């Protein structure tokens, strides 16, 4: 008898990672059943920012305009001492990935609410709130997830082809599949203070890190009239010393904040984790978001890394389920995501050393204040993969593994749009002034045809152009970028990472045999 499935994928947990996984799978017409323990959205603001990579993911799923009202541009970042001496500053450069700006402030409950509203409109997504998952079993064909309804204590089981565990840092699924969380938790407790703004104060819209050995602090404007501070407790303090807002006010007043500025809404306590699971996949079960990794908040990449995990899994798993990709693609999930998460984790740790004044005198001397966007090399670069389904060299000058920029382009009939909207959802070969299909060998073209690739010509604005598969570089961005890199033809994946170029060879990449070392 054929195996009977209730859905293509079971998702455990419905925070930002879980809802993005559901939306990404629905975008590929895959069905999901989601189990979430809580009845509503967790109301404490955890993540503070998103960047243009995350917004580009929203764009790919068609929800960017919906979530836009929950995002507010972030002006700049700075590191100050308590006497207002500036240690370091980053004026954010323009985005290379699409809509401006480069960084946005968010209020996480509002962003999650809008994402869930988008998911409610998708018939492929069946969300079951108030269920606690108690067991996850898998075999060669699928996964059985058992959950108990919290209100009635009734048990139910569903059968899916795959499962995604997005159930947070204390993930029970991670333990159930035998994965271990490796790393450390710092023995420092931080208090998070969420406030409602009552009046504007100078430079409120600059993300500020108050650098101090004893009492460093995060000071950030959230969207929708909210503001947040994160302040560590001293070794001789505990959460019991701050039972009410009266005690918390002492911390804010030390930063020059008064009751004329804000109203305290709530406060909570947490510790910083630097941890990663030793494997992100066991058979048909995948870990994503905090279930797979946790990092300090200094790079603003914790929630966003979970969103990127979910999107990576979603487009690959969805296409495996509908037969457009082979199951080997699922082996690329951890191979591609782990190094990127490790990079942001290390970045967060290093930025934390600045705010906690842990730099050596030599490091401090090299950290001169920066006031121009042109100084921020890291922020000007596009995201990059360090391993995975790619062909060619990973040198600093190579485009392989780099995310392609997204300027405005124009159709040959004069309609202006962002590049991704012109390219569509699939694999694309892009040629600078040339039809890329004419550059490929027959074997190379057969390989890309097998993936349903589209062949697109990018035409200069000062030349005649026609046809549905030609776009015009009216922003005069894409062609100079390609020329500077010495590339004439490149292959772009559905997630907009460059898989191959004519410099390193345009044959369809092979699959990686093993995941990177932990």
Image (spheres, grey):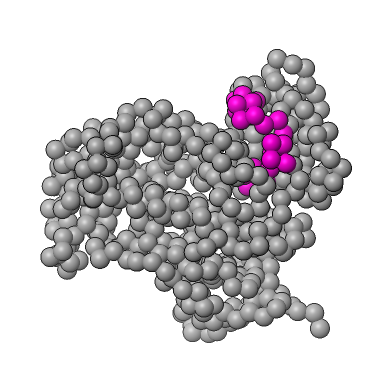
Q: Which residues are magenta?
A: 477-505
Q: Residue at x 28, y 50 (%)?
A: 353
Against 401, residue 278 (above or below) is below
> Is residue 348 visible in this depiction of the protein?
yes
Q: Residue at x 39, y 53 (%)?
A: 346
- Where residue 166 appears, x then y in whole percent? 51, 66
- Where residue 250 appears, x then y in whole percent? 12, 53
Q: Residue at x 29, y 64 (%)?
A: 186
Against 112, residue 240 (above or below) is below
Q: Residue at x 25, y 47 (%)?
A: 359
Q: Is residue 488 left or right of residue 206?
A: right
Nearest the viewer among 389 and 204 is 389
Nearest the viewer among 420 and 436 is 436
Q: Is residue 447 left or right of residue 298?
A: right
- Where residue 515 appears, x then y in whole percent? 58, 62
Residue 408, by quadrant, is: top right
Q: Is residue 133 magenta?
A: no
Q: Is residue 490 magenta?
A: yes
């Amino acid at each position: 008898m054929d195996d009977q499935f209730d859905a293509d994928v079971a998702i455990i947990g419905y925070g930002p990672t879980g809802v993005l996984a559901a939306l990404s799978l629905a975008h590929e017409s895959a069905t999901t059943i989601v189990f979430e323990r809580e009845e509503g959205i967790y109301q404490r603001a955890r993540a503070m920012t998103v960047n243009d990579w995350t917004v580009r993911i929203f764009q790919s799923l068609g929800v960017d305009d919906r979530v836009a009202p929950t995002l507010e541009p972030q002006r700049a970042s700075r590191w100050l001492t308590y006497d207002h001496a500036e240690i370091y500053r980053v004026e954010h450069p323009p985005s290379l990935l699409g809509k401006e700006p480069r960084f946005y402030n968010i209020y996480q409950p509002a962003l999650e609410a809008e994402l869930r509203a988008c998911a409610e409109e998708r018939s492929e997504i069946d969300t079951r709130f108030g269920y606690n998952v108690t067991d996850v079993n898998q075999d060669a064909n699928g996964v059985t997830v058992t959950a108990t309804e919290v209100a009635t204590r009734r048990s139910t089981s569903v059968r899916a082809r795959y499962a995604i565990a997005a159930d947070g840092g204390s993930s029970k699924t991670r333990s159930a599949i035998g994965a271990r969380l490796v790393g450390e938790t710092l023995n420092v407790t931080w208090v998070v203070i969420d406030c409602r703004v009552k009046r504007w104060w100078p430079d409120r819209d600059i993300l500020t890190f108050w650098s101090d050995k004893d009492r460093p602090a995060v000071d950030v404007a959230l969207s929708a009239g909210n503001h947040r501070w994160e302040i560590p407790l001293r070794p001789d303090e505990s959460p019991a010393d701050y039972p009410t807002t009266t005690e918390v006010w002492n911390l804010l007043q030390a930063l020059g904040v008064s009751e004329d500025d804000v109203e305290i809404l709530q406060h909570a306590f947490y510790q910083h984790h630097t941890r990663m699971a030793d494997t992100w996949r066991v058979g048909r079960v995948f870990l994503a978001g905090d279930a797979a990794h946790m990092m300090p908040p200094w790079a603003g990449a914790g929630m966003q890394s979970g969103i990127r995990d979910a999107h990576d899994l979603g487009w690959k798993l969805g296409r495996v389920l509908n037969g457009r990709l082979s199951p080997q693609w699922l082996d690329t999930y951890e191979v591609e995501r782990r190094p990127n998460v490790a990079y942001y984790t290390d970045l967060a740790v290093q930025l934390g050393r600045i705010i906690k004044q842990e730099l050596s005198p030599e490091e401090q001397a090299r950290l001169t204040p920066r006031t121009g966007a042109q100084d921020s090399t890291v922020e000007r670069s596009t995201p990059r993969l360090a391993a995975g389904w790619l062909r060619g060299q990973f040198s600093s000058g190579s485009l392989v593994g780099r995310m392609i920029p997204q300027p405005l382009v124009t159709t040959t009939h004069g309609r202006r749009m962002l590049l991704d909207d012109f390219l569509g959802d699939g694999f694309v070969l892009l040629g600078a002034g040339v039809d890329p299909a004419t550059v490929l060998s027959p074997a190379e073209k057969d390989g890309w045809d097998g993936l349903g690739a589209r062949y697109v010509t990018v035409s200069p604005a000062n030349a005649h152009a026609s046809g549905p598969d030609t776009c015009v570089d009216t922003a005069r961005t894409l062609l100079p970028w390609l020329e500077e890199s010495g590339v004439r033809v490149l292959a772009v994946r559905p997630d907009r990472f460059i898989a191959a170029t004519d410099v390193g060879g345009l044959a369809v990449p092979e699959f990686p045999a093993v995941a990177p070392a932990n």
